[in-house]
Image (spheres, rainbow, N blue to C red):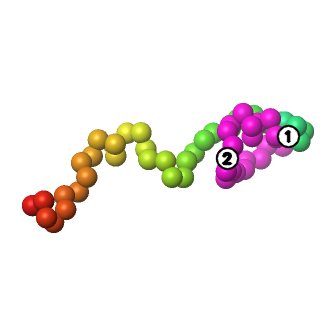
C-alpha cells in the first residue's frame, strides 16, 4: 500500500528525516522539499530595488 504524507519539521535536514523514518521501519520511496519558511526565493526578489521612502522623492 502506498500513502502520501506531508511533514513540517524544524532544525532537520533531509538525510536526518530519511534515517529516522528508515529506523522506524518505514520504507521511503521519495522525499520532496516543497517550501522553506522564512527563506526568500533565490530568483526574483534578490534583484528588486527597495521601495523609495517618501523623503527620497
Residue at the image position 19 percent from the left and 58 percent from the top? 52
* Quadrant occupied by the C terminus: bottom left
Q: Tell me, yes or no, whether the highlighted magenta stretch contains residue 6.
A: yes
Image label count: 2
Q: Quadrant of residue 23?
A: top right
Measured as percent of width and height from the top left, residue 51 is found at 23, 57
Residue at the image position 49 percent from the left and 47 percent from the top? 39
Residue with the mark numbered 2: 11
Measured as percent of width and height from the top left, residue 47 is found at 29, 41
Q: Can residue 39 be seen by looking at this rendering? A: yes
Look at the image and give the residue range highlighted in magenta. 1-21
Q: In this view, does 40 lie above or below 31?
A: below
Residue with the mark numbered 1: 26
The crowd level at tag 2 (other Cα within 10 Å; few <14, some 14-19, many 20+) is: few
Q: Nearer the viewer, residue 40 or 54?
A: 54
Left or right placement of residue 46 versus residue 7 in this view: left
Measured as percent of width and height from the top left, residue 37 is found at 54, 52
* Quadrant occupied by the N terminus: top right
Amino acid at each position: 500500500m502506498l500513502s502520501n504524507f506531508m511533514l513540517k519539521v524544524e532544525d532537520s535536514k533531509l538525510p536526518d528525516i530519511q534515517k529516522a523514518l528508515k529506523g522506524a521501519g518505514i520504507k521511503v520511496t521519495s522525499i520532496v522539499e516543497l517550501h522553506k519558511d522564512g527563506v526568500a526565493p533565490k530568483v526574483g526578489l534578490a534583484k528588486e530595488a527597495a521601495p523609495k521612502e517618501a523623503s527620497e522623492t
